[in-house]
Amino acid sequence: MNLFLLAGALIGFGLFLLVRELRPAPPRLEEAVARLRADYIPPDTSGDLAQRLGRLMATHLGSLPCPHRDLALLGRPVERFLATKLGLAVLGLLLPAAITALMTTTGGTPGVALPAGASLLGGVVLFFAPDLTVRSEAARRRADFRHAITGYLDLVALERSAGAGPVDALEKAASVSDGWAFARITAVLEQARRNQRPAWEGLARLGEQVGITELTDLADIAALAGQEGARVLDTLISKAASMRGQALAAAKAEANGRTTAMVIPIALLGAAFLLLLTFPQIYRLAIAG
C-alpha cells in the first residue's frame, strides 16, 4: 500500500509540474528587452494543448531524435508528434500500474517486479511506436510522390517542347493535376514567385525538406535551363524514363518478394491436406497395432 501511495504522490507531483509549465508565465526581463528591437519576432504560442505540450518538449528536449523529413512529407507538425509520443509513453507507464491496482483490490498479489517491468517496457514501446508509424506512412507517401514526379517530368518536357520558358513550364505542368503531390509543388512555386526567387530554389528546398532527391535533380535541370539557356528537353525525357525504369524494377522486386513469401503458406497448406488424406489410414494402423 505504501508503494501505491508513493506512486500516486509522484504522479501528482508530475502533473503539478506539467500544469505549471503550461500556464502562461509573466514576461521575463530578456524577452521584454527583446521586444524593443526592430527585428523582434514574437514566439509562436498558438495551437491547442497538444501543440503547446509538444512545443514545450521541443524546447527542453531539443536533442530528442525526430523524423523531421517524414513529418514534413506527411504535413504534420513536430509539436503534435512529440505530444503524441509523450502521451503514449505515459499511457504505457500507467496502464500496467492501473491493472496491478485493480488486481490488488480484488485480492490478487502480483508483486512489484512484474508491474514495474511491464510499465517500463510499455512506456518504451509506446514511446517509439509513433516513429515506426510515421516512417511507414512516409515511405508509402514518398513512393507515391516519386510516381507523381515521373508524370510531372513528362509534363514539363511537353511544355518545354511547346516553347514555354523554364518557370512557365514548371508552373503550367504543376497546375494540371490537383493531387496532393502536385499541390505541394504548386505551393512552393507560388511561394518562390511571391518572394521573387527562382522557382528551382523552391523545388530544391522542398526536395531537401521531404527527402526526395528527384526534386533536387529537377531543380538542377531547371536551373541549368534558366541560367545558361541550355536545351534540357532530352535530359527531362531521359530522367523520366530512368525514374519509370526504377519504379518498374522496384515493383518487380516487390512482386518477387511476395511470391517467395507465399511459398511457405502454400507448403503448409499442402502438408495439412496430405495429413488430412492420410490421417484415417494412420489412425487405423495405430488402433490395429
Image (spheres, rainbow, N blue to C red):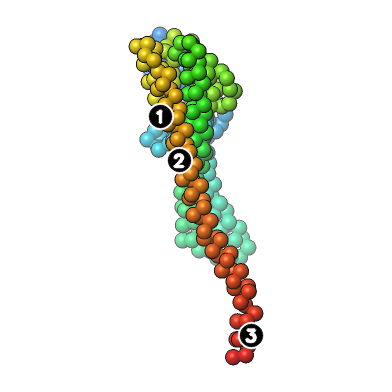
Image quarter in which the C terminus is found: bottom right
Figure quadrant of residue 32: top left
Q: Is residue 179 above or below residue 10?
A: above
Amino acid type at image mark 3: Arg
Mark 2 Cα within 10 Å, few/some/many (few <14, many 20+)? few
Figure quadrant of residue 226: top left
Q: Nearer the viewer, residue 281 or 4?
A: 281
Q: Could you say where residue 23 lies in the image, as x and y percent from the top left?
A: 52, 29
Q: Is residue 91 above or below residue 82?
A: below
Q: Nearer the viewer, mark 1 or mark 2?
A: 2
Please name the residue that numbered disc 2 is placed on: 249
Please name the residue that numbered disc 1 is placed on: 213
Please say whether residue 39 is visible from this viewpoint: yes
Q: Secondary structure at mark 1?
A: helix
Q: Earlier in the sequence, mark 1 or mark 2?
A: 1
Q: Is residue 177 above or below residue 246?
A: above
Q: Is residue 77 left or right of residue 211?
A: right
Amino acid type at image mark 1: Thr
Q: Which mark is residue 181?
A: none
State how far apart marks 3 and 2 are (Cα): 54 Å
